[in-house]
Image (cartoon, helix red, strand yellow):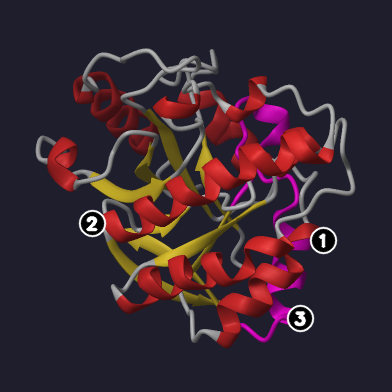
Amino acid sequence: MSYFIDYHTHSQLSPDSSVPLEQQAEAAVRSGLSELCITDHYDTVGLHGGPMDPYDWAPAVEQFQRVRAQFQGRLTLRLGLEFGSGHLDGSALAAAPPELDFVIGSVHNRSLAAGGDDFYYGDYYSPGACYQALDDYVSSLERLASAGAYDVLGHIIYPLRYMARGCPEVSMDRYADRIRVALAIAIASGRGMELNTYNGRTLAEWRPWLALYRELGGEILTVGSDAHVPENVGQGVPEAYDLIRAAGFRYIAVYEGRKPRFVKL
């Protein structure tokens, strides 16, 4: 029996979720997960590029400790963080508590020079508009990879989930060489990559990036649904495991105290 994990989920402590962690944990148990990592957002840049307040660790730690005790023996719970736009050094993690297990490094927003909006709000009316946004995204991803304030690079194909609404033919293939460099930097520094299922909606799109990551010698892989509501917890995880196996990987990674451990698929 597979050890299923979901290492990208959100609770009421994220600005785009209103769900208590207890409900996400219950959903994880119902979904047959063995391990759940809550990765609430920590962004210095808001949805439209404005500044955000510093992260308040106290409610995150309180919620985590309380729910972990409630689910002891039923579910392994980890405290993570999705470290978003603007974090190009580790200084913002200086106040992180010892309970922190895992950090996803993500790019959600266009650069401030390009307006700062989350890619969700893009007007993707033509391939040209999409590729203009992707040019900006990949440049930010390169900077994030080099900065190193993460354990895995999160949803590296993030903008495509929104571009598919208007331009389903758009891909990130033309950026393969640049993404190769970003992944190589992550690998060389002992970091990894996330396969993000986007609530079970983004799976086949990962095949070329899994192949590239494997070719580069990558080993650290986590799987996450990006669930913001209970019904999406664990969605696409079994199918993601199948993709990972097909790409030649034998293990997925879990974290404790920012240190990876490998679990056989």
Depth check: give the residue in front, 72 or 85. 85
Q: Is mark 1 in CB contact (under 8 Å) with mark 3?
A: no
Quadrant of the snapshot with the N terminus: bottom right
Q: Is mark 1 in CB contact (under 8 Å) with mark 2?
A: no
- How much space separates mark 1 and mark 2, taking CA atoms? 32 Å
Asked if residue 37 shows in the view, the reply is yes
Residue visible at 71% across and 79% down? 245
Of the two numbered discs 1 and 2 on the same chain, state the one appearing first in sequence: 1
- Disc 3 marks which residue? 246
Disc 2 crowd rating (10 Å Cα; few below 14, some 14-19, many 20+) is some
Of the two numbered discs 1 and 3 on the same chain, state the one appearing first in sequence: 1
Disc 1 crowd rating (10 Å Cα; few below 14, some 14-19, many 20+) is few
- How much space separates mark 1 and mark 3, taking CA atoms? 12 Å
- Image depth: mark 2 or mark 3 in front: 3
Residue visible at 48% across and 24% down? 11
- Image depth: mark 1 or mark 3 in front: 1
Depth check: give the residue in front, 23 or 45. 45
Please tell me the numbered disc located at residue 127.
Answer: none
- Disc 2 marks which residue? 257
In the image, residue 247 lies in the stretch drawn in magenta: yes
Quadrant of the snapshot with the C terminus: bottom right
Depth check: give the residue in front, 32 or 162. 162
Give the amino acid type for the residue marked by disc 1 in the picture. Answer: Ala
- Disc 1 marks which residue? 204
Give the amino acid type for the residue marked by disc 3 in the picture. Answer: Ala
Residue visible at 75% across and 69% down? 207
> Which x, y percent locates residue 203?
78, 56
The magenta-colored residue range is 224-250
> Which x, y percent locates residue 64?
33, 32
In the image, residue 112 lies in the stretch drawn in magenta: no
> Which x, y percent locates residue 227?
62, 34
Give the amino acid type for the residue marked by disc 2 in the picture. Answer: Gly
